[in-house]
């Protein structure tokens, strides 16, 4: 692919001259006559190099330079000036300019700068790519700007010991982000311990996190080591942290502040060295206002906040994700490689994906199993992409309810799936919305075989 160069200069003659010199050498050249247009083109086209005039109407070149360097993965910028002076050159260098050249530009000087800048940019890109390591099972796939921002946050957070709060809708891949942070940290050789705070009943979560001594409560027939102890010198990932009770939150806060835990039924304090990564699909600031989440714990957890965008905000990632999931599933199940027609891929990109990446993965696997044609075409997607709750009768092969009991179960299942979707599959919020204990809701999910993977 040709290196891309953007020329931002209000003089038509300068733009034409540089375009001719650089295109002759095989570069792709973009032109902008002022700073605001240059910024828009830089954001849209993501050039490798920018030749930027210092003196321009509307927006000064140094202002444009500052704005460009504030963006993620910014291009290398060479400043052009017809009134060159040391002070301007020094200021441009401080703002991040790659080099400074006086007008009228000599062709040999321009080409030398372009070659050096391209080499430097490629080296930077290679270093960025090498910085992140992934376990293949938990690879983040896609090349969108939104996903690159997440990757940049991982790069910055991973080498530190700072707590990280990952936010995003259910199914966006918050666990992948947590695992990537751990894998690229200096704790990578130590344990990564995951706890789903929403899936553990309230009366057991403290025992899970902090452990208990034998006989400390009814049913405690054996001593249990807590998750924080198991994660010593490694990382603990508290998924759905917004579902913890205020009592448990207080104990987690103590671990963060003091690095100490106490097993239930023990007076002995145990020191632990654990990095905490938390995730939630809730708005914790709203929960703080409602009195459901501790403000001091929120600030402890969100030292480094990372938002994972939903799939509908990065539709360009759908195609590489489909290819990735199809390849993995076929390899794991000894199936022939499958592909999708352009029409099918377009339909997949347009779908809203309420369950995000998890829903897309399940759809791809189902299509590979159920569809014989290759490549898989758009009409085959109609059933997979349809909306609405799937009642028990449909799950049993399309039979109509034969008895009043069957009908009631079908209606109850449909109602529960609808409410879970409304609450983004947050168990606590759903239980509260329908006026039932969380433990009862878990029983219903098991009874009807309801899961986000299947019904999301």
Image: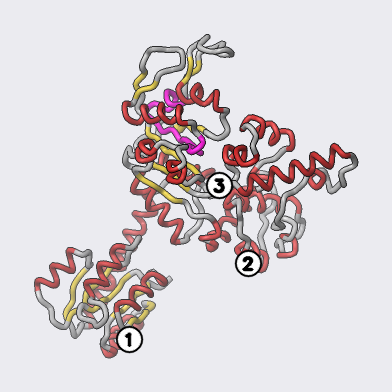
- Picture quarter with the N terminus: bottom left
| Quadrant of the rendered image containing residue 10 | bottom left
Mark 1, residue position: 20
Say whether marks 2 and 1 touch (CB < 8 Å): no
Magenta range is 227-243
Residue 438 seen in the current view: yes
Identify residue for label 3.
Answer: 170
414 and 151: which is toward the camera: 414
| Above or below for 389 versus 207 | below
Residue at 41% over, 33% down: 235
Q: Classify residue 381 by image quadrant.
A: bottom right
Q: CA distance from mark 3 to mark 2?
A: 23 Å
Q: Residue at x 61, y 56 (%)?
A: 353
Task: Please tell me which residue lies in front, 233 or 420.
Answer: 420
Q: Residue furthest bottom?
A: 13
| Mark 1 surroundings within 10 Å by alpha-carbon count, few (fewer than 14), some (14 through 19), many (20 or more) | some
Residue position for label 2: 346
Q: CA distance from mark 3 to mark 1?
A: 51 Å
Front residue of 314 and 427: 427
Q: Residue furthest top?
A: 215
Sequence-wise, the earlier of marks 3 and 1 is 1
Marks 2 and 1 sit apart, C-alpha to C-alpha, by 38 Å
Task: Please determine whether, in this image, residue 350 is positioned above or below residue 193.
Answer: below
Secondary element at tag 2: helix
> Is-magenta flag for residue 229?
yes
- Residue farthest to the left, as pictured: 86
Q: Label 1's element?
A: helix
């Amino acid at each position: 692919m040709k290196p891309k160069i953007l020329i931002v200069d209000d003089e038509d003659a300068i733009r034409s001259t540089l375009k001719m010199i650089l295109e002759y050498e095989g570069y792709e050249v973009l032109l902008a006559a002022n700073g605001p247009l240059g910024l828009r083109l830089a954001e849209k086209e993501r050039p490798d190099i920018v030749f930027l005039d210092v003196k321009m109407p509307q927006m000064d070149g140094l202002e444009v330079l500052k704005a460009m360097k504030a963006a993620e993965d910014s291009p290398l910028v060479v400043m052009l000036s017809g009134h060159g002076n040391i002070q301007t050159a020094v200021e441009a260098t401080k703002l991040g300019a790659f080099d400074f050249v006086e007008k009228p530009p000599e062709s040999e000087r321009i080409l030398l700068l372009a070659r050096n800048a391209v080499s430097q940019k490629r080296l930077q890109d290679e270093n960025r790519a090498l910085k992140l390591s992934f376990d293949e099972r938990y690879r983040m796939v896609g090349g969108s700007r939104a996903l690159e921002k997440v990757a940049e946050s991982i790069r910055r957070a991973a080498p530190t010991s700072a707590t990280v709060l990952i936010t995003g809708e259910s199914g966006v891949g918050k666990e992948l982000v947590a695992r990537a942070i751990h894998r690229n940290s200096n704790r990578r050789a130590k344990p990564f311990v995951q706890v789903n705070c929403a899936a553990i009943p309230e009366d057991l979560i403290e025992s899970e996190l902090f452990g208990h001594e034998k006989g400390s409560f009814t049913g405690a027939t054996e001593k249990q080591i807590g998750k924080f102890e198991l994660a010593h010198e490694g990382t603990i990932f508290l998924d759905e942290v917004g579902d913890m009770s205020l009592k448990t939150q207080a104990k987690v806060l103590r671990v963060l502040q003091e690095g100490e835990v106490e097993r239930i039924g023990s007076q002995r304090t145990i020191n632990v060295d654990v990095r905490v990564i938390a995730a939630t699909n809730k708005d914790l600031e709203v929960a703080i206002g409602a009195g459901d989440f501790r403000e001091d714990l929120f600030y402890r957890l969100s030292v480094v906040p990372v938002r994972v965008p939903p799939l509908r905000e990065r539709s360009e990632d759908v195609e590489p994700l489909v290819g990735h999931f199809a390849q993995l599933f076929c390899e794991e199940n000894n199936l022939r490689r499958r592909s999708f027609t352009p029409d099918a891929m377009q339909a997949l990109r347009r779908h809203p994906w309420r369950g995000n990446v998890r829903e897309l993965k399940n759809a791809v696997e189902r299509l590979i199993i159920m569809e014989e044609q290759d490549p898989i075409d758009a009409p085959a997607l109609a059933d997979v992409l349809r909306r609405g709750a799937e009642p028990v009768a449909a799950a049993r092969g399309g039979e109509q309810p034969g008895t009043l009991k069957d009908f009631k179960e079908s209606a109850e299942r449909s109602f529960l799936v609808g409410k879970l979707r409304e609450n983004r599959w947050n168990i606590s919020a759903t239980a509260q919305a329908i006026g039932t204990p969380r433990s009862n809701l878990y029983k219903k999910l098991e009874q009807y075989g309801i899961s986000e993977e299947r019904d999301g």
